Image (cartoon, rainbow, N blue to C red):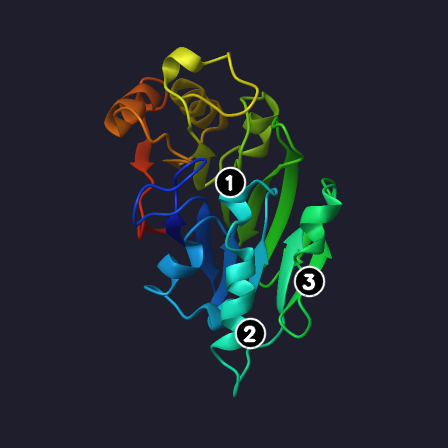
Amino acid sequence: MQLTVFGHWGGYPLKNDGTSSYLLEEEGFKLLIDVGASAVSIMQNYLDPADLDAVILSHYHPDHVADVGILQHIRLLSNQENRPPILPIYAHNEDERGFSYLNMKDVTEAYVYQEEDILEVGPFSISFLRTIHPVPCFAMRFSANGKSVVYTADSAYQESFVAFAERADFLFADTNFFKEMAGKSRVHMASIEVGRLAKQASVKKLMLTHLPQNGSLQQLKTEAAAEFNGEILLAEKGLSITI
C-alpha cells in the first residue's frame, strides 16, 4: 500500500496547505480518504482527479469534506469530451443533509456504510469504529494483501482504539493537542494519548496528523515518542509512505 498526504491540518489550513485528505493506493486502485479544504488543488500535483476510483468520508465537518463539491465539479467540467466514470463516495448517512450533497448526476454516487459493516472497495476490506466526536464520525481500518492501515479520523481517546488498531502496519491519528490536554477533551486526542495508543496496539509505524496550527510540531512528536518507541512521522503535504 502507498499513502500520500494531501492535507493534514485540523480545523483550517495554513496558507498553501490543506486539511484532512489522504490517498491510499493498492494494485493501482486509488482511494481518497476525506476531502478537506484545498484537497483538489493539492491533489493535482500528484494525480488527475479523474483517476480516482473511490472516496470514503469519516464525517461531515468542513475540514474533512470542504472540497467534495470541488471534486465533483472538476470531474464534471474538466473532462467534458471524455468524462470519467461515476465516482462512488462511501459515507454514513447519520447526517442526512451532509449525505445529500454526495450525489451528482453522472458524476458521483453516494453509498452508505454503517458501523458494523465490512466494506469491500477495490482491493480494500474496510471496517469501522465509531469515535468520540461532537458529530457522528468513524475510524477506519483498511486491509489488503496482508497489510493493514488504521485511520482514527477525529476523536477523543477511547480504549476501543487499541483493539481496533492492533498490530496495524500503519496508524495515522488525530493529534490535535499537546500533552497537557490529555484526558481533558471530548473532541480530539493529545500527543501522549496517541503515543500510548500506538504502543498498546503494537503498531509498526505512527503518523501524527490533524495537526494544531500553534505550537511546536516537533514538541508534539517528542511527547508522542515518550510513549511509543517506534517510528513516528509528522504529516505534511506530499508526504508519501510505502506500507
Residue 16 placement (x, y as % from top left): 30, 50
Identify the disc placed on residue 76. 2
- Which comes sooner in the sequence, label 1 or label 2? 2
Q: Nearer the viewer, residue 63 or 171?
A: 63
- Residue 161 placed where, x, y %? 57, 28
Label 2 SS: helix
Return the residue at label 3: 103
Distance of mark 3 from mark 2, alpha carbons? 12 Å
How far is disc 1 from disc 3 in space, using C-alphas? 25 Å
> Left or right of 213: which side holds 111?
right
Number of other residues with Cα within 10 Å of mark 3, as a class: few under 14, some 14 to 19, many 20 or more: some
Instruction: Report x, y in % for residue 224.
Output: 35, 23
Callout 1, which amino acid?
Tyr
Q: What distance separates the C-alpha of mark 1 from that of mark 2?
A: 29 Å
* Three-letter code, disc 3: Asn
Q: Residue type at mark 2: give it.
A: Leu
Above or below residue 75? Residue 17 is above
Residue displayed at 49% across by 69% down = 74
Residues at discs 1 and 2 in contact (Cβ within 8 Å): no
Q: Residue at x 70, y 51 (%)?
A: 99
Where residue 139 sits, quadrant-wise, is: top right
Residue under numbered circle 1: 151
- Residues 55 and 71: in front is 71
